[in-house]
Amino acid sequence: MSRMGYSRLMPVDREHVLHAAADLLARKATASMDEIAKSAGISRATLHRHFAGRDALVQALGVLGVQLVEERLAAARIDEGDPVDAVRRLVTEALPVSGFLAFLYGENQLFESTAMNEGWERIDEHVGALFRRGQELGLIRLDLTPAWLTEALYALIAASGWSAQEGRIASKDAGHMVSELLLGGMIRTVEK
Amino acid sequence: MSRMGYSRLMPVDREHVLHAAADLLARKATASMDEIAKSAGISRATLHRHFAGRDALVQALGVLGVQLVEERLAAARIDEGDPVDAVRRLVTEALPVSGFLAFLYGENQLFESTAMNEGWERIDEHVGALFRRGQELGLIRLDLTPAWLTEALYALIAASGWSAQEGRIASKDAGHMVSELLLGGMIRTVEK
DNA sequence: CCCATACGAGACATGAATGTCTCACACGGT
DNA sequence: ACCGTGTGAGACATTCATGTCTCGTATGGG
């Protein structure tokens, strides 16, 4: 069967390339195909063999990004249990895909693709519902809207990814930095 | 004196154009010169009359951005008084230039210009010192590093700018959303 | 050991953005 | 009313990323 040899090696490469591309494009949207290829450790020709063109690459990036984030979202089970713990789980789950999240967050105004926006809005809605639930339970401040908390979550995760990449914070501390700041703020309190 | 007529009108236009360019490029780094010109309400020819090319435009954007942010930083007098109040003042002052801040923050890895990085590091150091001072006074948590708090501040201000631009939060609430989340976090507390 | 498959390197054409130019016009001051 | 200055519109040439191609090579399975 000629199909087998083809389906065995392609997926791993594809995902690795897209991961590298997301990390690069999140912080340098003007990167050329050549730079993207180099960042993934492959040649430009091979990059074109896997993705018809830049548009196709960005499209695949968006699709995989939405898929990965939704997987992490599901794994974090944010609808269950204490919302505060749920936020911690969500941050922990989302950190490994911070590159994709930063890309989706920063470049989503670039998408007129309805399929992409649907996925992103589904994620938005899911995360926003967590904060709304926390507010209804009296655990989260009411003066900060769910929409804003959602945006802040994305922004902080993206920021932590960049900071870790540049060595400004330790990678192992990233989760703590994001969730603690988001949850408790920076003011020192007595009960902590 | 032929110089007078030239120095009277140029500065206002320049700043207005750069402001529009910052707002646009912060969320769409791939914008063409034509799009930038249109967003500033001028023609591409005029844009080229003021800035030799795209590089020169970006350079001027960086210089003005650093200058504006340093002005706001000075106006906020963050070295004086209660660090917590200083953070509030800083956020209030910085919000009007959130477009520039988002541009500088998001695209600073794009700069190899030493002059630019010097200015940006000066800002970084100044803001970081505020958080360090707050920690020494026992007002700010010690498990969140000044470098991270600085990054988080930029990220949240940028996020608030985009959110306001897209109508996800009200512009008048932006300052409150940023400073309250940054300072106190999202968890509802008894003393608030 | 051989063959298939994917890859890297590089040449090449294409197209879009860029940068430069000219010309006509609107406006503001004299 | 006139003239100077700055502008918009548009016609170019040029540069550069992009997309497609070929060829030589390495690797891995049969």
Image (cartoon, coloured by chain):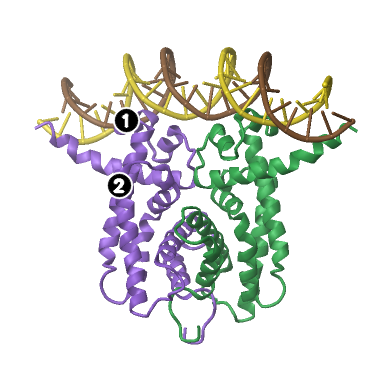
Chain colours: A green, B purple, C yellow, D brown
Q: Is residue A148 visible?
A: no
Residue flagged by tag 2: what amino acid is it? Leu
Local SS, label 1: loop
In the rendered image of this protein, does residue B53 appear above or below residue B189? above
Instruction: Specify few, some or many for label 2: CA neighbours under 10 Å numbering under 14, 14-19, or 20 or more.
Output: some
**Which chain contains the residue that carries disc 1?**
B
- Dot 1 amino acid type: Ala
Residue B57: quarter of image: top left
- Who's the residue at 40% across and 46% down the image? B22
Q: Is residue A53 above or below residue A84?
A: above
Query: Which of the marked residues, 2 or 1, is nearer the chain's N terminus?
Result: 1
Label 2 and label 1 in one chain:
yes
Residue that numbered label 2 is attached to: B64
Provide the residue designation for mark 1. B52
Return the x and y of residue C16 as percentages of the image width and height.
Answer: 53, 27
Picture coordinates of residue B86, whole percent (x, y): 32, 71
Q: Taking A161 as reference, is A70 left or right?
A: right
- Secondary element under disc 2, as helix, strand or loop, is helix
